[in-house]
Amino acid sequence: MKVTILQFPGTNCEYDTQHAFEELGATTEILWHKSETIPEDTNLLVVAGGFSYGDYLRSGAIAKFSPVMKAVTTYAKNGGKVLGICNGFQVLTEAGLLPGALKRNESLHFISKHHNLKVINNDNIFLEKLDNGSVVNIPIAHHDGNYFIDADGLKELEANNQILLKYTDENGEIKNPNGSVESIAGVCNKEKNVFGLMPHPERAMESLLGSDDGVAMLQGFFK
Amino acid sequence: MIKAIVNISLKAGVLDSQGKAVHHALDSLHFSNVEDVRVGKQIILKLDTDDKDVAMKDVTKMCEELLANTVIEDYEIELV
């Protein structure tokens, strides 16, 4: 299992992500955004969290024109598995690889805390180790995590089982921290090989540090 | 040289949290006749051309590709 982790100027979760996947037994490589190719032995490409290009203009807006993004798009279109976490999710929506957009949190505050999430659709490699309706506890840390999609787009997400996770309380009742449409925390593309979420599973790897619910999520990518 | 002024704002129907917060603050200052507030951004470009058609075409492309996220934002271009 080889995980390639993208690094833009301003990315700051690449080493956490690397540590998490190596703990699970993967080999990893951090790939600087100037690369025009993705290593051929890559089994999973992660767009890590942070503040690429200082979030200038909009979160993820500048990163989508980095040299590496053409290769990322080709990789995704050929069925390669891509996971965008937090700023990585924003980059993937800006690049058009995932539907919707991430707006400023409704409260306008940066939110950094553990939050419960309910698994909505597990018929995909990312969440297949979890049951639909089960609740996981994963940290969130974002300013622009307010997921928006128009009514037609939402219908399509629902029809294709593309909604991965929703923000809830510990009983799985909707509890929306940031104003996201339908309390959506993560989505995938129609083909179910590109995944994006605002919460940080790579920060939930040790119960001693608050939660190890991220393990089952990241393990989904191991075949 | 043509100057292009691009105004970008959230689409109607997309909740503008910043606008709402500013509206609330104006209320607190007793500006009670404010009906709605929308907060956007303005990008000013100096273009090395005198052809308005070319300028409009180029700036429209810039908006579609980078300056605005058309999933949530509208843009208006003014050439001066």
Image (cartoon, coloured by chain):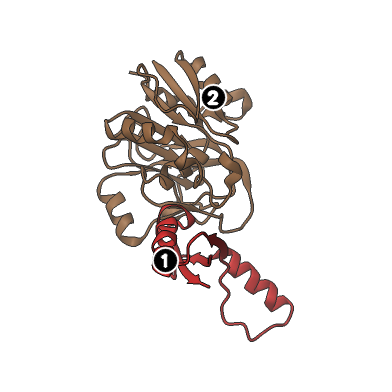
Chain colours: A brown, B red
- As measured in the structure, the alpha-carbon distance from the residue carrying label 2 to the one carrying label 1 is 51 Å
Please tell me in which quadrant of the rendered image residue A72 appears: top left
- Say which residue appears at 33% left-offset and 40% top-offset: A121
Q: Position of residue A4 (x, y in %)?
A: 44, 23
- Say which residue appears at 38% left-offset and 37% top-offset: A195
Camera-side mark, 2 or 1:
1
Q: Is residue A202 visible?
A: yes
Q: Amino acid at mark 1?
A: Met
Against B39, is A163 above or below? above
- Say which residue appears at 45% left-offset and 36% top-offset: A84
- Say which residue appears at 48% left-offset and 44% top-offset: A90
If the image is split into quadrants, where does the C terminus of chain A sit? top left
Q: Is residue A86 visible?
A: no
Q: Amino acid at mark 2?
A: Met
Direction right: furthest residue: B29
Direction bottom: furthest residue: B33
Residue B56's disc number: 1
If the image is split into quadrants, where does the N terminus of chain A sit? top left
Chain of the residue where label 2 is placed in the rendered structure: A
Residue A205's disc number: 2
Chain of the residue where label 1 is placed in the rendered structure: B
Residue toward you, A179 or A99: A99
Residue A161's disc number: none
Q: Position of residue B54 (x, y in %)?
A: 40, 63
